[in-house]
Amino acid sequence: MMLKPKRLMAGDTVGLVAPCYGVNLGDAEEPLAQMEQMGYRTKVSRHFYVRDWTFAASVEKRAEDFNEMAADDEVKMVIFGGGEVSNEILPYMDFDLIRKHPKIYCSYSDGTTPLNAITSLTGLVTCYGADPGVPGGKNLYSARSLAAAINTGTAPYTFEKCSEWTTLRGGECSGELIGGFLANFALMFGGSYLRIDKTKKYLLFLEDHEQFGSPSVTSKYLSHIEQSGFMNNVSGLILGHYADKFYPEILDILRRIADRYQIPTVKTDDFGHCATRGTIPIGVSAVLDADAQTLRFTENTVEA
């Protein structure tokens, strides 16, 4: 049984940290104001704006901030944006502390690494898809999708669609959701912060973007995941937004994987590095119907 955080309520405190990259002074003013207008209190970590390593605060300071937010029972949700260096803080994160003080953790992109580490090592459900600009941002789909996960989160409910999905291989499957940004997720294999239960089936969701590399780079990271043996435990595959223009190579890559493992597979533009950032909880059970092109969560993401 997975550990569930409490749902976020009006008046709760949202904590902002910066484990992935340095934040420029003033960049967080609008997201903070938006969240406060929504009725939340906000708290910024002590080293949020520090850049003593040029690109970010030192790893010790970033981890210290993360652990302080984890220990702070006033903070009900910790949210952070992406970057490049979140993996640096893993050896300094206090996972026992995180387990003892369960709360919502939400991020995307480079945040893939700490989110999956938390779920894997503590059993706590985390949320992939949103950064601090999403809760009160202008994209209503992104805000609704996040709210469905953290404010309601009552199963069964269906992931809201905002685009046309492409079915690469049909069928229905179930499993525990796992994934995030492709490069970060792939690089977790071989380390000690991602523990795969060989008795489970997983629904793998991944996203990538052309700005970070060509289709061949996507294929490279997918091959790394395959060579870990993990795909033998994958029941279905969902790939999120890749580019604003059509890339047939991406669909070819997915079809090869789908056929190789005989798993239902879909392509969507409803989460990832795009305007429509749907939220997908890591660690909950779900059903993918690739023929009907639906993703249904069969387990609560939060508790009352």
Image (tube, helix red, strand yellow):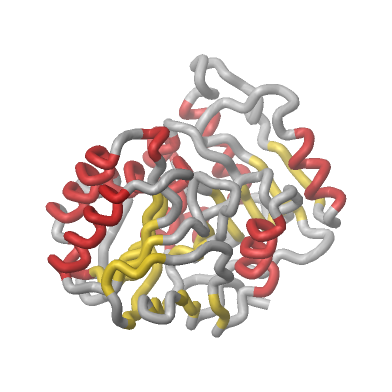
Instruction: Give me the residue at 64% from left, 30% from top.
Output: 48
Instruction: Give me the residue at 45% from left, 51% from top.
Output: 241
Question: Whole-percent x and y of residue 272?
Answer: 48, 50
Rendered-image quadrant of the N terminus? bottom left
Question: Whole-percent x and y of residue 28?
Answer: 72, 34
Question: Whole-percent x and y of residue 178?
Answer: 38, 62
Question: Whole-percent x and y of residue 68?
Answer: 61, 43
Location of residue 7 by image quarter: bottom right
Location of residue 23 by image quarter: top right
- Pick the front one: 164 or 110: 164
Instruction: Give me the residue at 51% from left, 48% from top.
Output: 108
Q: Would residue 192 be visible to someone looking at this image? A: no
Q: Does residue 291 appear to the left or right of 244 in the view shown?
A: left
Relative to 124, does residue 113 appear above or below in the rendering? above
Q: Does residue 245 appear to the left or right of 198 in the view shown?
A: right
Instruction: Give me the residue at 57% from left, 54% from top.
Output: 277
Q: Would residue 237 be visible to someone looking at this image? A: yes
